[in-house]
Amino acid sequence: MKNIPTYDQFLNEMNKSENPNIINIKSQTDLSGFHVVFNGSTLNEKPGWFGLSHLMEHLICKNFDHLMDEFDKDGIGWNAYTANDKIVFYLTGLDEYVNKHKSKFLDLLCNFNVTEEMLENEKKIVIEEYLRSFNDQLHANILNSHRKLFNYYNPIGLRKDIENTTLKDCKEFFELQFQNPSKIVNVSKYNLFNEDIKLDTKNIDKQFSYIKEINESTDFYEAVDFTKNSTIVYMSPIVNDKYYLVDFATDLLSVGLKSPLINEIREKRGLTYAVDCWMGKLSDSSGLVHIGCQTSKDKLPELQDTVYEIFKNPKKYISKERFENIKQWLEINKRKSEINRYARIEEFITPESWDTHKNIDKITYDEIISMFDEYLNIDEFFINVDNE
């Protein structure tokens, strides 16, 4: 019989740690997750480096190629992802097997072993992923809108920069980004992680630096030829505070068929199949609201009029009943996430000012309605339409 530490014992052990960026979370099952977070990502990129965070994510994964057979044998799932402000590598599986591999996995992530041959081959793979990102018409519009509005290339990067990346670029970026992780999140039922390791501090407070003036040049657009439909993308001005409020407002607007955006645009008028609305995190101190959908060209005017009507009249379209329903939906999702915490660690690496779950009890209906004038004023949104 395993000696299973209680949650209180976990908390006591956590409090002994001198480093608050080593986070131990007690799993509710025998499934475990070990997540290594490197803050920075695209916030460390510059002209000539656009896409280097994502390319280096691929290359760093080559460091544990020799463990793949062992991972398979031990039933270990592994992956990595590059977000706007962080790069995360992780292992998931049964607790005893994740615990077996976590220290070696961590050591391997913090070593530079890239060769010219590896770089050239991985560049080809990343370019294929890059091209795939522009195969979806709406996604292509969003990516090109970010380029136009902010001269920002997202984790997918700029094709010519990826193609021209040198081994020297990789070494320089590695020293800036990957020498030490920013956070460790260990989700386990049986095994704490309290190793004495050096963690990075220089990337903790990286901020999103953007160009305020719209860049009219299309030199860096990725050309896409979609002739049958148009897509429309709305993007708000940069959000610098009240992140969780704005995030909750996007849920109120878009979750489910009865949400204002989907009910009015799709269900009542048949103008589109889907409407996406979300708050994107650019850095700890900046976010951006997006609305995106695809429609036929002749339906564009009515679709735009409907979006405008909803945002100008939030009290008409967001009832108190819907407000309470979506609050409960969030609370239930939090309970689901707690059960699957071995694989879902965002709440443990997200600042509290962004965490809607942690702040849900503070949010009032009147506060949500009143914030539309300041944070969700549709008159101030940037709008990009392709194939008008």
Image: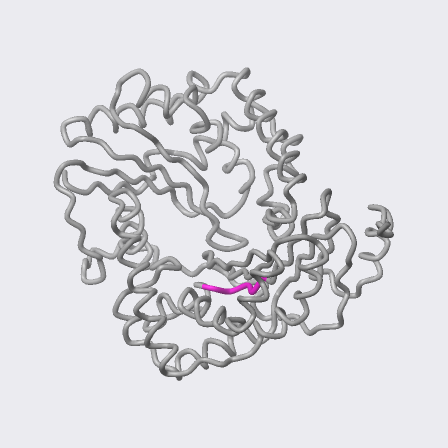
* Relative height, residue 139 to residue 318 (above, below): below
Q: Position of residue 370 (x, y in %)?
A: 50, 27
Locate residue 263, reporting x and y percent.
37, 20
Judge left or right: residue 200 versus residue 15. Answer: left
Left or right of residue 6, residue 32 in this image: left
Q: Main SS type for the magenta part?
A: strand
Residue 60: percent from left, percent from top: 49, 71
Q: Is residue 268 above or below residue 90?
A: above
Residue 260, by quadrant, is top left
Q: Which stretch is magenta? A: 37-41
Asked whether 289 or 267 is in front, the reply is: 267
How many numbered dots are placed on residues in this image?
A: 0
Which residue lies at the image location 51% right of the left edge and 62% below the top edge?
87
Q: Quadrant of the C terminus?
A: top left
Residue located at (63% from left, 35% from top): 336
Magenta span contains residue 231 = no
In the displayed structure, would residue 278 be above or below residue 224? above
For the rendered model, the colour scheme is one colour
User: Where is 89 relative to 306, above or below?
Assistant: below
Residue 311, x across and y down, in percent: 38, 27
The residue lying toward the viewer, choosing from 271 and 237, is 271
Q: In the visual, does 318 lie left or right of 21?
A: left
